[in-house]
Image: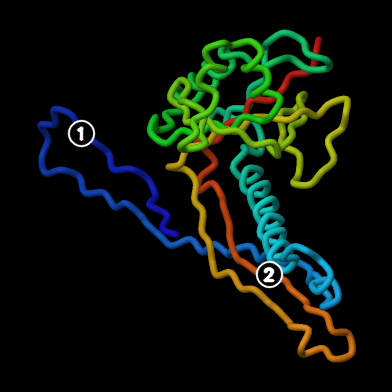
């Protein structure tokens, strides 16, 4: 990946010559793809003979779905900011109390837009991924949001305040006091940690996919066990390119 460095300085109504020459340092950044492997699944010939459906096809599909579940959850966790800064705002919801948290409102999304604007994050390519709680909040409170909730062609919710909006139920958790993100896979504490919706800029993020390989040992090669073994391996990664253009809206604790 190329690190393009800083932007060139722009002069307005300049009258001093010769112009000062500047150098824009670029460089290559090496990114190592994560390796994903699934544990082999055993499918015996007895199972394939007795079942009325194609179990081999079912197993292959379940391996693919398991890969997607892990890589998508790791990607959204990587794109969420580590903590609150000017360039990576982490905001708390301000709506009515629902159980042990405050609901998300349109006002909260407007506040996130304002924070992105002040941080000079490009308007083009802004994405907002709502967690399940926040989607439900808007559906229950906002008739306009409910009316345009789903676009059956793209799978995306209609745009809101410059954000292209999606939903995903495995968004990361934050400590509501420190506004710091929990480590991937950490168990959230009931008293302090709540789930977030994630915002990021496509201009500040990258993804790369490597090769995918399937492994199959057929029953014909196992005369003593007469069983098939299937597994998969793939390489992929999704990361922010800079610690900016990332944001989150976390469900605030009830007062």
Q: Earlier in the sequence, mark 2 or mark 1?
A: 1
* Quadrant in which residue 51 is drawn: bottom right
Picture layout, residue 230 above or below residue 21:
below
Q: Residue at x 45, y 22 (%)?
A: 118
The residue nearer to you, when weighing 94 against 26, is: 94
The residue nearer to you, when weighing 140 against 222, is: 222
Picture layout, residue 194 above or below residue 223:
above
- Dot in front, 2 or 1: 2
Where is residue 116 drawn, in percent x and y?
48, 26
* Quadrant in which residue 191 is drawn: top right
State the SS at label 2.
strand
Q: CA distance from mark 2 to mark 1?
A: 55 Å
Where is residue 109 drawn, in percent x and y?
55, 19
* Quadrant in which residue 63 is drawn: bottom right
What label does residue 122 carry, if any? none
Picture layout, residue 177 above or below residue 52:
above
State the SS at label 1.
loop
Where is residue 239 drawn, in percent x and y?
56, 50
The 10 Å Cα crowd at callout 2, few under 14, some 14 to 19, many 20 or more, is: some
Task: State which quarter of the image contains the C terminus.
Answer: top right
Which residue is identified by label 2? 232
Q: Residue at x 43, y 42 (%)?
A: 203
The residue nearer to you, when weighing 56 against 160, is: 56
Mark 2 touching mark 1, by CB under 8 A?
no
The residue nearer to you, when weighing 116 against 159, is: 159
Which residue is identified by label 1? 11
The 10 Å Cα crowd at callout 1, few under 14, some 14 to 19, many 20 or more, is: few
Question: Tag count in the figure?
Answer: 2
Picture layout, residue 229 above or below residue 236:
below
């Amino acid at each position: 990946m190329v690190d393009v460095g800083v932007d060139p300085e722009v002069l307005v109504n300049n009258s001093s010559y010769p112009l000062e020459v500047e150098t824009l340092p670029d460089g290559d950044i090496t990114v190592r793809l994560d390796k994903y492997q699934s544990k082999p699944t055993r499918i015996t010939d007895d199972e394939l003979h007795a079942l009325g459906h194609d179990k081999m096809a079912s197993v292959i599909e379940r391996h693919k779905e398991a890969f997607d579940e892990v890589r998508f959850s790791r990607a959204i966790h990587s794109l969420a900011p580590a903590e609150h800064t000017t360039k990576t705002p982490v905001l708390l919801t301000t709506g009515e109390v629902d159980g042990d948290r405050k609901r998300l409102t349109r006002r909260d999304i407007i506040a996130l837009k304002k924070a992105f604007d002040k941080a000079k994050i490009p308007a083009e390519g802004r994405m907002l991924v709502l967690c399940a709680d926040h989607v439900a909040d808007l559906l229950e409170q906002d008739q306009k949001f409910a009316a345009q909730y789903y676009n059956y062609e793209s799978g995306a919710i209609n745009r809101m305040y410059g954000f292209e909006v999606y939903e995903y139920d495995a968004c990361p958790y934050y400590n509501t006091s420190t506004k710091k993100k929990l480590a991937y896979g950490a168990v959230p504490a009931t008293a302090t940690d709540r789930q977030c919706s994630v915002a990021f800029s496509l201009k500040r993020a990258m993804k790369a996919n490597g090769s995918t390989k399937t492994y199959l040992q057929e029953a014909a090669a196992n005369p003593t066990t007469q069983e098939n073994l299937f597994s998969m391996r793939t390489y992929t990664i999704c990361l922010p390119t800079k610690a900016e253009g990332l944001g989150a809206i976390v469900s605030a604790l009830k007062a």
